[in-house]
């Protein structure tokens, strides 16, 4: 008797859910995708014809019961809402005995909470990016550039020096050019733009320019906006 394919339920039909489902289908898994927006669900169904796209809330027990969840091997909740992802995983694990649950965690501070509440795998994109940056940019230099393969763009990590910026939230500072600031980091943890900066904090910037030295000069010159 041939073994049945692994059955995965994906909750959330945004970009993450769409591409995850596409990859799973390509790899030969059986996949059902749950998306609450009917128009979005119809679009996904048209693009991924071999996927069962179900319209409903993946964090509602009654709806999950209609998804074939009793035979699911994995439930992956990847919506943009941490609470919805947690509830979906808890229902899958506790009510339907799904062996493996995976949750996307949008707020990195929720990772440990998800683990304590029984989610098997809690994935924080921010934490993954930070880990990659820490590995790639492991250096004591005040500025380090990590080229992005196949492009002229790069990620640049700059250490905030003692100066006018210290003690002020990043969101209130002026002087940085129109580069894309991706992350503010302190001791490996992401800061928000309202947190007052300290000397030694790090700014991670995406740049498409071939040189990065001007960014260090601009970070050193950051100062509070005049009100």
Image: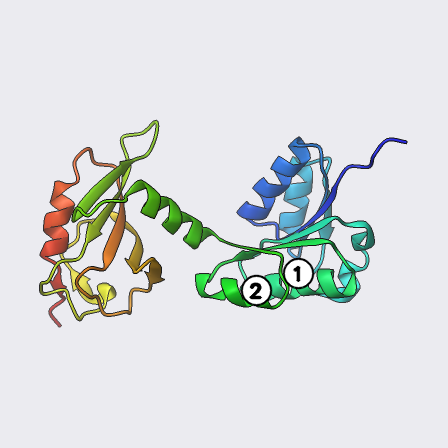
**Marker count (numbered):** 2
Residue at x 15%, y 54% (from the top left corner): 219
Residue 136 image offset from top left, x and y in percent? 32, 41
Query: If the image is split into quadrants, where does the C terminus sit?
Result: bottom left
Residue at x 17%, y 57% (from the top left corner): 160
Q: Decide: marks 1, 2 in contact (CB < 8 A)?
A: yes
Residue at x 28%, y 69% (from the top left corner): 195
Residue 53 image offset from top left, x and y in percent? 72, 46
Residue 59 visible to the viewer: no
* Residue, disc 1: 89
Of the two numbered discs 1 and 2 on the same chain, state the one appearing first in sequence. 1
* Closest to the observer, 78 or 132: 132
Residue at x 46%, y 51% (from the top left corner): 125
Using residue 148 as the reference point, say whether residue 142 is left or right of it.
left
* Closest to the observer, 113 or 89: 113
- For mark 2, give the secondary structure: helix
* Residue, disc 2: 114
> Compared to 169, does 205 lie above or below?
above
Q: Residues within 10 Å of mark 1 (few under 14, many from 20)?
A: many
- For mark 1, give the secondary structure: helix
């Amino acid at each position: 008797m041939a073994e049945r394919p692994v059955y995965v339920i994906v909750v959330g039909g945004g970009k993450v859910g769409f591409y995850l489902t596409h990859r799973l289908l390509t790899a030969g898994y059986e996949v059902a995708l749950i998306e609450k927006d009917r128009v979005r669900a119809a679009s996904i169904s048209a693009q991924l014809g071999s996927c069962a796209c179900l319209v409903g809330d993946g964090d509602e027990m009654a709806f999950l019961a209609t998804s074939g969840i009793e035979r699911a091997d994995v439930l992956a909740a990847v919506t943009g809402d941490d609470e919805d992802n947690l509830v979906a995983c808890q229902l899958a694990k506790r009510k339907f005995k799904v062996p493996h649950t995976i949750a996307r965690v949008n707020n990195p501070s929720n990772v440990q909470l998800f683990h304590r509440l029984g989610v098997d795998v809690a994935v924080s994109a921010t934490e993954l990016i930070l880990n990659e940056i820490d590995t790639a940019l492991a250096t004591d230099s005040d500025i380090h550039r990590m080229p992005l393969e196949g492009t002229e763009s790069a990620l640049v990590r700059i250490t905030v020096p003692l100066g006018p910026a210290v003690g002020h939230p990043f969101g209130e500072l002026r002087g940085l050019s129109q580069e894309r600031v991706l992350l503010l980091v302190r001791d490996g943890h992401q800061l928000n733009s309202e947190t007052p900066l300290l000397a030694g904090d790090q700014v991670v910037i995406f740049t498409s320019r071939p040189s990065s030295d001007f960014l260090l000069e601009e970070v050193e010159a950051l100062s509070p906006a005049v009100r």
